[in-house]
Image: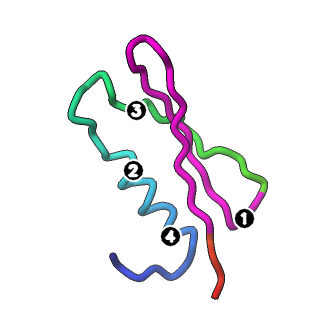
Amino acid sequence: MKKTTGFGEFWTRFVDSVLKYEADEPEHQIAWDDEEEETGLSAVRSIHGTYDMDGVEHNVHVMAVKIME
């Protein structure tokens, strides 16, 4: 993976990759929310989506946490 200059750049590329994911079965495709979730923390980013499995809606949360050395 390409080295980033900052957490924001990493997050943007990471989210782009996540949103491009396509499940093998169309019914398991995740519907992502239009906006990033508000975490209240600059070092924690999160997106939310849902998918339907057998008529039951499931929440999906993808998070990234900036860890300082």
- Mark nearer the viewer, 1 or 3: 3
Q: Residue furthest right?
A: 40
Q: Which residues are magenta?
A: 41-65
Amino acid type at image mark 1: Ser
Amino acid beneath label 3: Ile
For the residue labelled by badge 1, is the local secondary structure a helix, a strand or a loop? loop
Indicate the quadrant where residue 65 lies.
bottom right
Does label 4 or label 3 sit earlier along the sequence? 4
As measured in the structure, the alpha-carbon distance from the residue carrying label 1 to the one carrying label 3 is 26 Å
Q: Secondary structure at mark 2?
A: helix
In-front residue for pair 11/26 = 26
Q: Residues within 10 Å of mark 2 (few under 14, many from 20)?
A: few
Is label 1 in contact with label 2 (beta carbons under 8 Å)?
A: no
Tell whether label 3 touches label 2 (CB within 8 Å). Answer: no
Which mark, by number, is residue 30? 3
Of the image marks 1 and 2, the number of the one nearer the N terminus: 2
Position above or below: 10 against 24 = below
Image coordinates of residue 69 in percent, x first then y, are 63, 88
Residue that sits furthest to the left in the current view: 24
Q: Which residue is mark 1?
A: 42
What residue is disc 4 on?
Answer: 9
Q: Quadrant of the N terminus?
A: bottom left
